[in-house]
Image (cartoon, rainbow, N blue to C red):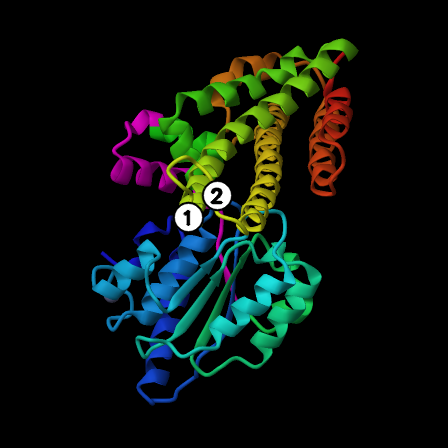
Amino acid sequence: MTVYDDLVGQGPVIGQLEAAARAGADVLAGAGGGGMTHAWLFTGPPGSGRSVAARAFAAALLCPDLGCGHCVSCHQVLSGTHADVEVVRPAGLSYGVRETRELVLRAASSPTGGRWRVVLFEDADRSTEQAANALLKAIEEPPARTVWLLCAPSPDDLVVTIRSRCRLVTLRTPPADAVADVLVRRDDIDPDVAAEAARAAQGHIGRARRLATDEEARRRRAEVLAVPSRLTGLGPAVEAAEALVKAAEAEAKAAGAELDAAETAALRQALGESAKGRMPRGTAGALKELEDRQKSRTTRMKRDALDRALLDLASYYRDLLAVQLGADVALVNAERARELRAYRGTPEATLQRLEAIMTCRERLEANVNPQLAVEAMTMALRTG
Ligand SMILES: [Zn+2]
């Protein structure tokens, strides 16, 4: 067992990180060598394991054995309790300048364990411009023992000034059989169920696990995939758009409410809630701040849920294109092969439909009203 066990299908990345952890240990031992890189950027498509890789690297840097996976230090880093590792996970749509400045200050203090102080910044692409500037200063002149691990979908998601100062770690989409293998081995999932979930999730490990274990998630996905065959005219297109948006909202609201309730209860207790549920004076601001952050997070979750539905929809048309072109590739939605073969239309029309989905994703990312963006898409997808 090592700290890299949770990385699926990322052989080259593991090799790179092992070499870097050795170089870091040489620096600590005073052996010199190539020296230590103080800023790293982990990129890869959603679900490929960016933050898993960054966390494993943090553990390797702090482990006397370069990432054995079972010492106290490794356990602490992997479970998120190591004093020298701070994990930053922006809850909402953006990470602000005040938070970043405070983070930079904390990052500059000496490591308690004598090795490195590591800041693992997930979704670093959500930093506001001012926050990115504050971060840049810290990365330009890093304290000798501080290591920044930034995660983002692609290098282009960060401003070039930050990007150019980071060493890149590029994760790839893990192959479906590697994902299925993990589900069987680690989560004890039936091999057939694992294979289908891995295929449907298109390399997103967390999504594959959810599809394999959560019937509701499977049902929602099936509903999305039933959309193309229903788009026979204007009326159905409008209805389908509404259904897609509402389903994503309901999903995000349910998941968000669960998180919110637990957080709010914890904060109220920490602030000194009385047995009768009364709050001490002067605590309203803190509660309001939490509420704002939660709202922002729910917005993000709604957008993510809708995007996931659009990716499922795109997989349908990509399969359709493969069938129309007679390409010899494994279909993501193999269970719909018969329906796909019966679909009437040209490969050109299918390409246009795929494009309509991608345009919709871009619009949503640019904060266009979801109902409007999705309706424009279903209009472009309809066959009648
Ligand atoms: Zn260890």
Dividing the picture into quadrants, the one containing residue 126 is: bottom right
- Sequence order check, earlier mark of 1 and 2: 1
Looking at the image, do the residues carrying marks 1 and 2 touch, with CB atoms under 8 Å apart?
yes
Q: Is mark 1 within 8 Å of ligand 1?
A: no
The residue shown at (48%, 71%) is: 106
Q: Indicate the position of residue 301 as horizontal and vertical percent values.
A: 57, 37
Callout 2: SS: loop
Q: Does the magenta stretch include residue 186?
A: yes
User: Label 1: which residue?
Assistant: 272
The residue shown at (43%, 40%) is: 265
Q: Indicate the position of residue 51 as horizontal and vertical percent values.
A: 45, 54
Rendering quadrant holding ligand 1: bottom left
Callout 1: SS: loop
What residue type is disc 1 on? Gly
Q: Work out how far the residue at label 1 is from the one at label 2, CA to CA, in angstroms.
A: 7 Å
The residue shown at (43%, 84%) is: 34
Q: Indicate the position of residue 361 as horizontal and vertical percent values.
A: 69, 37
Vertical relation: 182 (above or below) 160: above
What residue type is disc 2 on? Met
Q: Is residue 182 magenta?
A: yes
Q: Is mark 2 within 8 Å of ligand 1?
A: no
The residue shown at (38%, 64%) is: 57
Query: The N terminus appears in which quarter of the rendering?
Result: bottom left
Residue 36 located left or right of residue 234? left
User: Label 2: which residue?
Assistant: 279
Q: Indicate the position of residue 240 as horizontal and vertical percent values.
A: 67, 16
Residue closest to the eye, 143 or 36: 143
Residue closest to the eye, 335 or 190: 190
What are the residue bounds of the magenta stretch?
A: 168-193
Residue closest to the eye, 364 or 297: 297
